[in-house]
Image (tube, rainbow, N blue to C red):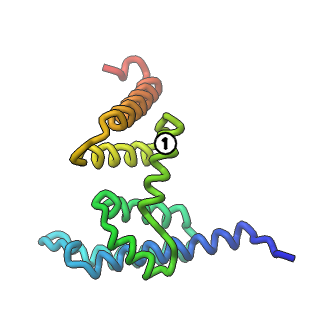
């Protein structure tokens, strides 16, 4: 007889997974000179070390949604740059079968099928895909137009929502 996994156990598994992914992502940045930025006001190595400490704190406090968002934010640049070495690094480092590119393309497909952008994160994903498609040597103009229409629709709905929340005398 199989034992059912409780939601608490599922969260603990997810917490471990995202902690490993965030830490591996930060380690990748620390191990690659391409990601070093040092100015009189900023040292990226110190920044990544500080982020690792904060990630540990989020983990210890059970902040799964925060770790998930951090992972998403930290990996955006690697997805945009199509850094497949990073994806391989994650697989080896975390011993998981992760593919950040599949997750990204799955999100894009889901948005396109729904024919509507509903969140700022979806807006960003579609914007990033439009940029990527426009940079191709043979861009899919139909797909770009469809995505641009979704972006415009979302911006229009968001603006209308803002305007509706304002008093008439505040809109000038």
Q: Is residue 163 visible?
A: yes
Residue shown at 42% from the left, 77% from the top: 23
Which of the image's four quarters has the N terminus? bottom right
Q: Position of residue 101 (x, y in %)?
A: 41, 60
- The percent position of residue 129, horizontal first and vertical second, equals 34, 47
Pick the residue in front: 32 or 23: 32
Q: Residue furthest top?
A: 168
Residue at label 1?
111
Percent of width and height locating residue 172 = 30, 20
> Looking at the image, which residue sits at the far left?
40
Residue depicted at 55% across the width and 67% down the height: 63
Residue 86 vs residue 12, the one in the foreground:
86
Residue at point 42% right, 75% down?
90
Asked whether the viewer can see residue 155, the reply is no
Left or right of 129, for residue 22: right
**Residue nearer the viewer, 91 or 34:** 91
| Count of picture labels | 1
């Amino acid at each position: 007889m199989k034992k059912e996994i409780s939601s608490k156990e599922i969260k603990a598994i997810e917490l471990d997974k995202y902690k490993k992914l965030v830490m591996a992502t930060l380690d990748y940045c620390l191990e690659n000179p391409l990601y070093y930025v040092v100015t009189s006001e900023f040292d990226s190595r110190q920044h990544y070390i500080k982020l690792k400490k904060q990630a540990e704190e989020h983990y210890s406090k059970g902040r799964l949604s925060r770790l998930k968002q951090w992972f998403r934010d930290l990996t955006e640049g690697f997805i945009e740059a199509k850094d497949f070495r990073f994806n391989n690094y994650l697989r080896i480092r975390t011993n998981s079968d992760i593919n950040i590119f599949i997750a990204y393309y799955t999100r894009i497909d889901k948005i396109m099928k729904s024919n509507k952008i509903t969140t700022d994160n979806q807006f960003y994903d579609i914007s990033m895909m439009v940029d990527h498609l426009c940079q191709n040597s043979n861009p899919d103009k139909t797909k770009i137009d469809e995505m641009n229409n979704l972006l415009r629709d979302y911006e229009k709905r968001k603006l209308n929502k803002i305007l509706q929340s304002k008093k008439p005398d505040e809109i000038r």
